[in-house]
Image: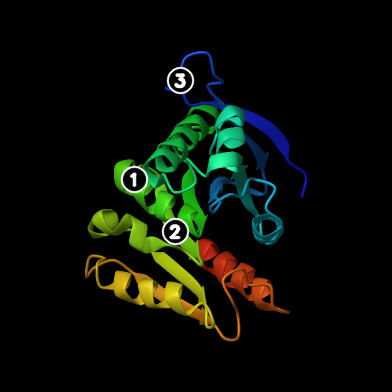
Amino acid sequence: MEARSVRIDVGSVEEGKSRFIEGDLALSSLRECMVVFAHGSGSSRFSPRNRFVASALHNAGLSTLLLDLLTREEDAIDSLTGRYRFDVELLASRLVDAVRWLEGEYGSNLRIGYFGSSTGAASALIAYARYPDNVRAIVSRGGRVDLAAHYLQSIKVPTLLIVGGYDTTVLRLNREAMDMFPRDCMVRLEVIPDATHLFEEPGALEQVADKARDWFLKHLP
C-alpha cells in the first residue's frame, strides 16, 4: 500500500508547540470512500495491526488515512506520563480536524468511515457525535466504547463492534454498551472466537480485516 505523508493543522495547542498531527494517506479506486483510523492507547499510525487492516481495506478499493492523534510534543509527554492516551475528548477533536481537512482537500462528497481500536473506538464515536457530516459507518476493534457512553445515543450510522472471545472485560463492556445505542441504529457485535484483546492469535487479525472490509464496502460506496 503506497501512502503519502500529510500534516493536519489542529490549531489549539499550548503556545510554542506544534499545531500539526501527521498521517499516512493512501488513495485507492474508491477515492471518495475514506476510512480514517483512530489508534488505541499508546499506539500510533505505525501500529502493525492497524496497518494490516488498512492494507486489506486498500486492496479492496477503499482509501485510508492512518493518523497520529497527538502532536510530536504531546506524544513525547504521553510516552513518559500517559497524560493524553485516555483523553478521548481531545483525540475525538483531532479526528474531527482530520475529517474537515479531508473535506477541504477532496470535497464534501466524501463518504467517511471510522476504524477505531481500543480507546480510539471511543474517540471515533465521540467524533461522529460531534461532527456527523459525511461519516457513514464505524468499526470498532477491541473498542472501549464504554468511554463514549454519554454519546452513544447520538450514533445513527451502522456500527460494527469486533471483540475477541477471550477479551472478557471488553466483551462485557461492549455488550452493555449496545443497549445505549438508539433503537433504530444498526449496531452489530462480532466475536472472534479464541482471540484476545490484540488479536495476536493465528488468523484472528485476518478475520478482523475481513469483517471491517465487508462492513465498509456495504455502507460506504
- Say which element carries label 1: loop
Marks 3 and 1, how far apart in space?
A: 27 Å
Secondary structure beneath disc 3?
loop
Query: What is the crowding at mark 3: few (fewer than 14 residues within 10 Å), some, or many (at least 20)?
Result: few
Circle nearer the N terminus (3, 1):
3
> Which mark is first along the chain, 1 or 2?
1
Name the disc covering residue 132, or none: 1
Q: What residue type is disc 3 on? A: Glu
Q: Position of residue 54 (x, y in %)?
A: 66, 55
Left or right: 7, with 143 as reference point: right
Where is residue 47 shown, x and y percent of the image? 67, 53
Per the image, the residue denoted by label 3 is 14
Residue at the image point whose x is 30% and y is 74% from the top: 176
User: Which residue has dot 2 on it?
Assistant: 138
Residue 32: which quarter of the image? top right
How would you rate the neighbour count of disc 2 (Cα within 10 Å): few for under 14, some for 14-19, many for 20 or more? many
- Residue located 35% across and 49% down the image: 126
Dot 2 falls on a residue whose secondary structure is: strand
**Going by the image, does 61 lie left or right of 15?**
right
- Residue 59 sits in which quadrant? bottom right
Q: Amino acid at mark 2?
A: Ile
Q: Quick one: label 2 or label 3, which is nearer the N terminus?
A: 3
In the foreground, 143 or 4: 143
Question: Looking at the image, is mark 3 or mark 1 nearer the viewer?
Answer: 3
> Would you say 38 lies left or right of 86 here?
right
Q: Is residue 155 visible?
A: no
What residue do we see at 35% from left, 77% from top? 175
Looking at this rendering, what residue extends furthest in the bottom direction? 193
Which residue is nearer to you in this view: 85 or 89? 85
Residue type at the position of mark 1: Pro
Crowding at dot 1, Cα within 10 Å, few <14 / some 14-19 / many 20+, comes out as: some
State the image coordinates of residue 96 (x, y, percent, origin top left): 42, 37
